[in-house]
Image (tube, grey):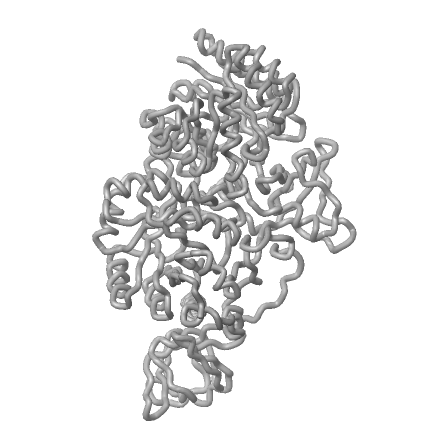
Amino acid sequence: MTTKQLKRPEVLAPAGTLEKLKTAIHYGADAVYIGGDAYGLRSRAGNFSFEDMAEGVAFAKEHNAKVYVAANMVTHEGDEQGSGEFFRTLRDIGINAVIVSDPALIEICALEAPGLPIHLSTQASATNYETLEFWKNEGLERVVLAREVSMEEVRAIRAHTDIEIEAFIHGAMCISYSGRCTLSNHMSKRDANRGGCSQSCRWKYDLFDMPMADTRRSLLTSGEVEEEDFSMSAVDMAMIEHIPDLIEAGVDSFKIEGRMKSIHYVSTVANVYKAAVDSYMADPDNYVCKQEWLDELWKVAQRELSTGFYYQTPSEEEQLFGPRRKIPVYKFVGEVLAYDDTTGLATIRQRNHFSVGDEVEFYGPGFRHFHQPVTEMIDDKGVSIERAPHPMMVLTMPVISPVEPGDMIRKKK
Amino acid sequence: MNIEITTTVESIEQAKQLLEKGIDTLYFGEETYGLRLPTSFSRTEQQELVELAHSYGKKATIAVNGIMHPDKMATISEYLDFLAQIKVDAITVGDPGVIYLLNKGDYPYSFIYDGHTLVTNARQVNFWAKKGAVGAVIAREVPYEELKAMSSHLDVWGEILVYGATCIHQSKRPLVRNFFSFIQAEESVGKERDLFISEPKKPETHYSIYEDTHGTHIFADNDLNLMGQLDKLVESQFTHWKLDGLYTPGDNFVAIADCFIQARQLIGEGKWTTEQMNRLNEQIEVLHPKGRGLDTGFFLMDPDEVK
């Protein structure tokens, strides 16, 4: 038996919309983070109105989950106006915490919305325990670590402070220290720290020197390999194989990136990490990372996966140079609305085109999943159909295993 | 009105020249703790530079403005003590962990908050002032219209870069080294290699890029020159000016600093005219390194232009 004193970490999922919030919680997220209409960094994510937030909070409470609001913009003069009322409204709606990096907003929130817990955003690039102690003394409840912190550093930080630690475990990563990049401001006139980031780090650049001041000499090839553009773009993070390390290092909250991502993505990733955390907490000594979890994450991966800075400084292997290595691509094709146990028929809402004969996979919370061919489809008029071409159309089909409302269906592209 | 001019330093000899010209504060440090410095000085040199500044009745500010990981924090107390011993006047700090240490200890010097891109609002500056900052370095991405609005709300002074390179990206990743490894090129990646990147389909752009122990740094397409905007700075009471010589070596940097000292003199005497401004601007353009551009950055931009 283990003698380890382990605290169950929260699985924290992104939720760009109310539908994603409900999906994430349904699929096991202990908490979700969302954006409001103001003060956030994802101007293109579906941000929440106060009404949506209230509905989201009610749903979360029913399921014993929490809702955080990211208000992590770096304000310019005047942007902070109205933020006191904004924070008070969030508090009164029942939001569990706000995620903030700007000290102006932190101060306003603490003064004008007392009782609303504050988490320091990763935008503040916290990399040492003294910084965490600083913010603890300011009354903050939690610090989201910089993505540049190694596992050894997480342990060192945890050894010296008892403030809650949140760390990114999955998803795309800023290439810079978060907040310390204004490439987008300078190249696209879009403020990276106020929700406008144009992701200039993912562009392809020339790299050159100017030996004669006026003449440039490109350095995109050494002659050894084919010419390659310079880019800062990196692969994504996946810490699924290192859950014990993260828990034992004392990380309180496992953060999944991606408020812009689909319900297919959010449900899959939350489901996997919840299963892994449950499995480890149930029996730490005999825990193994299951291949099916990895397989599952690859189904929604948009880039190759790595462990970021946790175990080493990322090398060229973790940059997106050269031809892209092929990753499996799956399409989210439908969601289960109902299931009739007596007939074995599932009622499905179509989310992407699929046809009789397709091999599909059903998956649901608690890591239930199975494959089957689509043998028959019946539309809402009772007519047998070969294809489901219309977005959101409702149909029924026989399934080989029981399913539940909220289960999802995907198909290999 | 007292205009204070701070400049970076690349050598003891250059420090002497800058002090002779009349700058108020020498700004330097060592690479372990300070960001993007022209030279990383030894402890002995740092002591010598502080003594030199003091011998002219001037000040020495040390860059301790890195994002500090635990390995750097493990040794920083000894450095902070050393800076007290050599009697520095101030340090710049960008990591709240360092402020935590400063407030726990009893250090005889003050600190200036330098969070680079993160200082864009007077309330942020005032927050750090409450934690002990005597001033703050304002982000380069703040246009003049916003500076004006900031001015009356500031509890402590805000420092403005009036000349030099603007860092627009700091990554912990060795981005250039990784690229050269990928294309199997044997290349150095430090500042002295003088590398640039240009945007897709904009070959005329030239963003400087280099690596050091803090990671990879990328700089704005053109270096900043606010010689033509000094009257606006004075009017809005931004009277702490910094000149950064990271990419402007030797005597030319001293001569450029002298242009700003002359401007200060003329402004103080009420003799600042367009002719004088144009004259000094022309000198700066001649002295500025070939192959590097100059512009006013975000200063004259309409705040609404940036989304």
Look at 45% across and 21% down and name the residue there: B240
Image side of residue A363 versus residue B30, left or right:
left
The answer to which quarter of the image holds residue B214 is: top right
Image side of residue B142 versus residue B243, left or right:
left
Horizontal and vertical percent position of residue A162: 37, 49
- The answer to whether residue B275 shows anywhere in this view is no
Residue B109 against residue A255 in the figure, above or below: above
Quick one: which residue is furthest to the left in this view? A92
Residue B90 against residue B54 in the figure, above or below: below
The answer to which quarter of the image holds residue A273 is: bottom left
Residue B89 against residue A392 in the figure, above or below: above
Look at 29% across and 49% down and name the residue there: A117
The answer to which quarter of the image holds residue A278 is: bottom left
Q: Nearer the viewer, residue A318 or A83?
A: A318
Horizontal and vertical percent position of residue A132: 40, 44
Image side of residue A141 versus residue A372, left or right:
left
Q: Nearer the viewer, residue B220 or A98?
A: A98
Horizontal and vertical percent position of residue A163: 37, 49
Horizontal and vertical percent position of residue B121: 37, 34
Position of the C terminus of chain A, as image quadrant, is bottom right
Quick one: which residue is furthest to the right in this view? A223
